[in-house]
Amino acid sequence: MKYTMAKKIFAAALNVYYSKVSAQGLEKIPQNQPVLFISNHNNAFIDPLLLASTLERRITFTAKSTLAKNPLLNVILKSFSVELLSRKIDRTGSETGRSFNACAFERLEEKLHERGAVYIFPEGKSHNDPVLHKFKTGAARLALAYAEKCGGLDIENDLLIVPLGLNYSDKSTFRSHANIQVGEPLSLKAWLAGNSLSDVRGLTNQFRLMVSEAMDEQNSAIRKAALTVSQPSTRAGIGAHFRYWQKRLLGAPLGILGGVLNLLPFAVTAFFRRILSTDRDHPASAAIVVGPPVFTIAHSLQLSVLGALGSLFLMLLYLLMLVPSSVLALRLFDHLFHRKATSAH
């Protein structure tokens, strides 16, 4: 229940922050088979939310343990199915994360045995570089430990490793574009037919190649789409012109109303977005985390003011107009600032 509600809330937040969230290759993902997702990691907290909001099936995520120290993030982590991992770079003094991580990996392995889906970022950290960083061996060790415990893989318990390429036209910019490219899955059973169960490094290298190929496929599709975009026809009938101006004459006032209703929470979210961001990894994550509670509080206060005025009609009108006017406000923003949904690059 918590997972479903959190997923819907953050899916809405993502579709507000990004002008378009798209995905290709979702048909490659099975619905009732153990799956291990691996991908590049370029946008901090947004990356797992992007997949969670796109897929129907429940996913168990992994995250660095230090995130739990943030009270607001900790609430979100508990709402989703997240296993925390201790990174060496985050430890101090004589601390070791061996036993902590061993327990976390046991729980992740159990999820796979329950035919669940697990998502790991093999790079181990989010970054701004256009190329993949060195892959850690954790994802491969989890996959091989699963196979070893199964005592052999068959069609029923075969683990499918699904690579993802995540791409953002400008990850830190409001109303930019986010995209998921699902690459070619790998059957662990098929891989083990020609490789050793102890070849952790070999499987890790295979994972890196798969994610790289998914990213290349994505970039190729984007370039092809850019070359084949047809120009809109300049010849339009009277009916088309009428509908064009009808949308603008009716939509502009509602869009302006939506802008007024959302101006304060937008400004507050933008303020927190700035003070919580130390590099290009953080702005989108900060906005997505802070935005939902800020907008909820702001709209509740606006509704309370109308209630205090004793006008039930205005309260009902406010509730009826809030969503459509907010959507039109976003479209107006895109039009004024030329933030139409374009392909990520």
Image (spheres, rainbow, N blue to C red):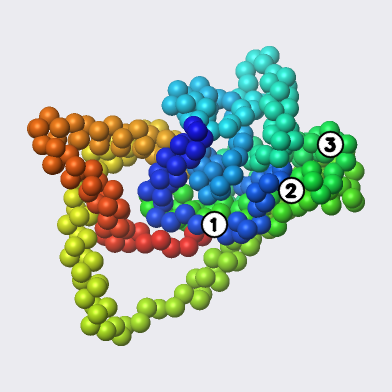
Instruction: State yes or no: discs 3 and 1 in contact (Cβ < 8 Å).
Output: no
Front residue (pair 123, 191): 191
Q: CA distance from mark 1 to mark 2?
A: 19 Å
Residue, x 76% and y 45% (percent of image)?
159
Whole-percent x, y for residue 97 in the image: 69, 21
| Callout in the foreground (3, 1) | 3
Instruction: State yes or no: discs 1 and 2 in contact (Cβ < 8 Å).
Output: no
Residue, x 24% and y 80% (percent of image)?
239
Residue 278 is at least partly visible in this image: yes
Residue, x 56% and y 47% (percent of image)?
56
- Secondary structure category for the residue under label 2: strand
Residue beneath disc 1: 23
Q: Crowding near pointer 3: few (<14 within 10 Å), some, many (20+)?
A: few
| Three-letter residue code for mark 2 | Leu
| Three-letter residue code for mark 3 | Cys
**Count of numbered badges drawn on the protein:** 3
Q: Quadrant of residue 83?
A: top right
Left or right for 107, reference 51: right
Left or right for 202, reference 60: right
Residue beneath disc 2: 160
Q: Which mark is residue 150?
A: 3
Residue, x 90% and y 43% (percent of image)?
196
